[in-house]
Image (cartoon, rainbow, N blue to C red):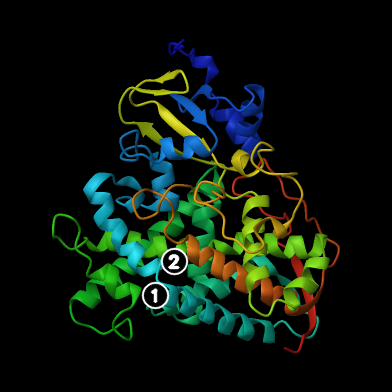
Amino acid sequence: MTRLTTTLAPWTDSTLPLLARGYAWLPDRMRATHGGPVRTRLLGRPAIALRGPAAIGFFYDEKHISRTAALPGPVLDTLFGRGAVHTLDGDAHRARKAMFLALLKDEAGVAALADHVVLQWSEAVTGWEGGRRVVLFEETALVLARSVCAWTGVPLSDEAARQMAEDCTAMVDGFATLGTRHWRARAARARQEDALAALVRLAREGEELAGDSGTAFEAVAWHRDADGRLLDPHTAAVELLNIIRPTVAIAWFAVFAAHALHRWPSHRDLLRKDADGHYARAFAHEVRRFYPFAPFVGGLAATDLTWQGETIAKDTLVLLDLYGHQHDPELWDSPYRFDPQRFAGREPGAGELVPQGGGDPAHGHRCPGEDITVAVLATLAAELAALDFDVPEQDLSIPLSRVPTRPRSGFVLTTTRREAP
């Protein structure tokens, strides 16, 4: 029998518990309902949370869930940007998304970016020799900022590259919180949007800025939307950052990879012996499954819906539990055991591993840069395994109350020498 939607009292709002408990909030609520839908309020809006492979298909069906107006202003002003592809639906979304798919799903392009990362990493490691203490999170973010900007065709001085790395990490670090972190994220986004919009204007005026043709910078600067119009410079800057920022954000996964290698050192030898890169990819997949990244994604019910006997009224906020999905014992054997062998000799299915969302990136809102994340993370995991480093005493705890989280210390290491190939 269909259960009717109940009216939730204002005191059922879960905004403060979410801010306090972070990644644990929704899985704990799901546990109380044995994995069934969870009803609550967030920011005063009625909300329902779903989990599981069937929920992924339901959530990413545009007839069910709308992204337009779903993302709150504070998230747009920090993480995604106003006018970003994430805020579009229908033909407008497909036309903009096609640009990203062409840039980020190209195998040769992904491999070229990984090559940039190897080059920048090698240069960075040279400067770490001699026992200098290095905060891996900060140094990796800089490596990734230099790599993705060179690959994208955005010209940066050394000082500008450091600012880009700091600003991109600030945007990610401050989107899901209040106070200083949030305002730092807003300032970082505004600064980089202004700088990139200025470059787009100069390029359109005929000044050569981005090197050879065929770069992502050129593709975004001259992209025409579904209405046939060029993106305005601000929106072009937003979308350039939606290539650069997620790539720099792989720094979070990189420190998780280092954390895994430190905690379970047997994986170092397996990565060092991995001539074909298959184990590195399996290791990268397991890092993305095991460690916390995005707690959930959300959208608005596009119409009155029914999900497994639950009615969902139009405009209800619908959440898809990602972190809980990655640790659901109904889906994963011993989900709190770190085991790259889960992915040995295979790639995970579209509804199986969803740390960056689910569905089909060609037709839905799944991140089109996931191939880049896996390739770059596998590359960095192999480089970390080849690096001879010590881990001094520090706080390597990973607080689940903080979103996004990472080891508290940022993972401090000291290097002595690099292993010969």
Side of 232 where 12 appears, left or right: right
Residue 31: x and y in percent read 66, 27
Q: Is residue 93 left or right of residue 393?
A: left
Residue plotted at (57% across, 55% down)? 348
Quick one: SS at disc 2? helix
Specify whether residue 45 is in view.
no
Badge 1 crowding class, 10 Å Cα cut-off, few under 14, some 14 to 19, many 20 or more, is many
Residue under the image location 20 percent in, 58 percent down: 225
Q: Earlier in the sequence, mark 1 or mark 2?
A: 1
- Where, by quadrant of the figure, is residue 127 drawn? bottom right
Residue 405 % position (x, y): 64, 50
User: Label 1, on which residue?
Assistant: 152
- Above or below 62: residue 371: below
Residue 29 numbered mark, or none: none
The residue carrying mark 2 is 244
Residue under the point 30% across and 40% down: 68
Which three-letter amino acid code belongs to the residue tagged 2? Answer: Ile
Callout 1 amino acid? Thr
Q: Quadrant of the C terminus?
A: bottom right
Compared with 352, 125 (above or below) is: below
Image coordinates of residue 320 in percent, x first then y, are 50, 37
**Where is residue 343 shown, x and y percent of the image?**
65, 58
Mark 1: which secondary structure?
A: helix
315 is higher (above) or lower (below) than 59:
above
The reply to whether residue 37 is visible in this rendering is yes
Do the numbered discs 1 and 2 sit on residues whose CB atoms are within 8 Å? yes
Residue 257 figure quarter: bottom right
| Residue at the image position 14 percent from the left and 55 percent from the top | 227
Mark 2: give few (<14), some (14-19) or many (20+) Cα within 10 Å: many
The residue lying furthest to the right in this view is 393
